[in-house]
Amino acid sequence: MAADRVLLPLAEAQQPLFAGVDLGGTNVKAALVDDRGRLVAFHTEPTRAERGPEDAAARMGRAVHTLAAHAGIATADIARVGLGSPGPLDIPQGTIVRAGNLPGWDGFPLRDRVAAHAGRDVTFANDANAAGYGEFWVGSAKGASSLVLLTLGTGVGGGIIIGDVNVEGAHSHGSECGHILVDPSAAARMCPCGQPGHLEAYTSATSVKAVARERLSAGAGGTLAAAVAAGEELTPLVIAREAERGDALATGVLMDAARWLGIGIVTLMHAVDPEVVVIGGAMTFGREANPVGRAFLERVRQEVRDRAFPVLAERTTIRYASLGGDAGSIGAAGLARLDHRRSRS
């Protein structure tokens, strides 16, 4: 959505209003939405994680005030704030348990400090779960009864929404779809979390680069090999570009990742039986608008057709996400909306 972001005039917004803050390792994104999930105001700024969690919490709180100012309302007119954070989290306590890409943030009471700076109650959620709710509420799964979201980026995040319930789990580790086991063999690839055979070890941008690098080191040729030999950095974007040009190595790496993704999706389908499976994140190769994106999605779907119960393979919709980088902030606002409604019922 970011490229074609349209802001709704306040006069057309359906009250109440909710703010959502999406904490990333690089940027903080904040969105003000109305009761139907339509954007009223948007703000983004660098995370500056090296300054520490209290500095970031203060700026996230100020971002809520900034949204209000942009919309021409008082901060008190925002019913509630949602906050999506990388995990693992302790959601009841409102803390980050282990912040891999935010050194020094472990155990920090992020929810309560953002609430103190914003002056509003805060709903705390895993960032991928928040993105999942965004796609469920107003994105690719709008109108569906349930969703599984997989976000492909540096790692693989996940969100599971069933009938307006965000599956957080008993220990705040629910919906960690990137860490389902897909390869129990002794030769399984190692996941960055330290365990072998997880989906993330096969379908993340990190793993795609690693597989390509291994095959290049083994002597594979072609246009991708030539580009890297000429000094280009090996990235998923470069791999996708060369796949679009017909390079066999690049195409093989991406189709292998799609195959593993399909295997993981089948497991999730059999466990959850979602109406829609949504694939998002940075590594979606231009989605349906690009031939590589179309081929990647079709390879995922083919693996599902080959492995899932026939009724699931036939009836489960698998598609790309539609909200882009705004999913997390919109979804966090949506989760705040749910808590606000529950508090009033």
Image (cartoon, helix red, strand yellow):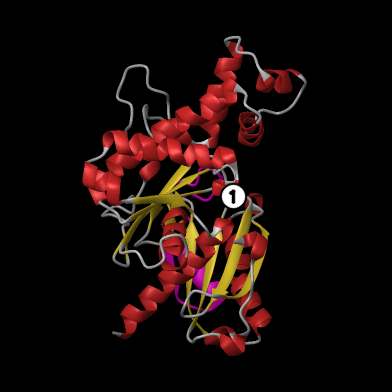
Q: What percent of the width, then of the height, locates residue 308?
A: 26, 39
Stretch of the chain drawn in magenta = 98-124
What's the residue type where badge 1 is placed? Gly
Q: Residues within 10 Å of mark 1 (few under 14, many from 20)?
A: some
Q: Is 218 situated above or below 296?
A: above
Secondary-structure class at tag 1 = loop
On screen, residue 193 versus residue 52, left or right, reads left
Between 255 and 101, the one lying in front of the other is 255
Q: What percent of the width, then of the height, locates residue 49?
A: 62, 51
On screen, residue 255 versus residue 9, left or right, reads left
* Residue sitting at x 57%, y 28%: 209
Between 128 and 163, the one lying in front of the other is 163
Between 103 and 322, the one lying in front of the other is 322
Per the image, is 113 magenta?
A: yes
* Residue at the farthest right position: 230
* Residue sitting at x 46%, y 68%: 138
On screen, residue 53 versus residue 95, left or right, reads right
Image-quadrant location for residue 45:
bottom right
Per the image, is 333 magenta?
A: no
Q: Is 139 situated above or below 321?
A: below
* Residue sitting at x 51%, y 80%: 34
Kindly identify which residue carries mark 1.
25
* Residue sitting at x 37%, y 29%: 195
